[in-house]
Image (tube, rainbow, N blue to C red):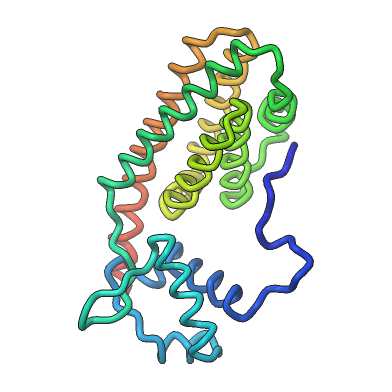
Amino acid sequence: MAELPDPHTAAEPLTLADQAYGQLKQMIFDFTLMPGDRCSESELAQHLAISRTPLRQAMQRLEREGFLQVVPKVGWQVAPLDFDTFDELYDLRVLLECHAARHLAETDQRPALDALAEAWLVPPAERLTGPAEVGQLDEQFHALLVQGSGNREMARVHREITERIRIIRRLDFTKPARVETTYDEHAGILRAITRRRADEAQRLVRAHIEQSKLEVRHITLDMLYRARRHS
């Protein structure tokens, strides 16, 4: 399957700030740093065994991405999960991906379909099961779908949405049943596009994204509840 560009595959090695960024982001994703928690630069520097300068650079990068925020007279804080914003981002995904599905169903040039079919139209025994692997493959599916529209600005906006919702979206694949459902639903979308059934493809894309939105909200709230109980 065609691979999406990885920002960390450049020839230059990761800087200390890059390493701190990756570690802090994972701590936020794992709810080691809980939404709303205050963040002490000195404590984090000690925990990550890093100096304050690259740590601050990493935190500023996470602030730009919306994962951290600076509160006056308080300092750094993990951004609370804003489900209203997540809902709006999912709604925007629906618009972009439905447009892309219709375009792919109606256009003659659709090289993305072969790559997508190779990854998703596979026998059950050949399906991936690891949450991280499936999560990455899922992101590639939706990204290639939008890239197939040929609209570079739509693809850029879609990448930004993907980054902003990843903190909750990745949890969709921690449940085996959701992995199986994702494979089945992606296969249905691809078959509708291949058969040039644009309306059906759009309906399936919309239903798929809406269901995923509901599932990740439920899983996220459950994980937050469990994390708080054990904190």
* Left or right side of 226 for 114: right
Residue 80 position, x and y percent, is 28, 62
- For the C terminus, the image quarter is bottom left
Q: Is residue 34 left or right of residue 61?
A: left
Q: Residue at coordinates 48% horizontally, 37% vertically from top-left?
A: 178
Q: Position of residue 194 (x, y in %)?
A: 65, 13
The residue positioned 56% from the left and 31% from the top of the image is 146
Q: Quadrant of residue 50?
A: bottom right
Could you say which quadrant of the image residue 203 lies in? top left
Query: Residue farthest to the left?
Result: 73
Closer to us: 131 or 29: 29
| Relative vertical location of residue 83 with respect to residue 186 in this rendering, above or below | below
Residue 185 against residue 177 in the figure, above or below: above
Residue 141's x, y, as percent? Answer: 60, 35
For the N terminus, give its image quadrant.
Answer: top right
On screen, residue 216 above or below 212: below
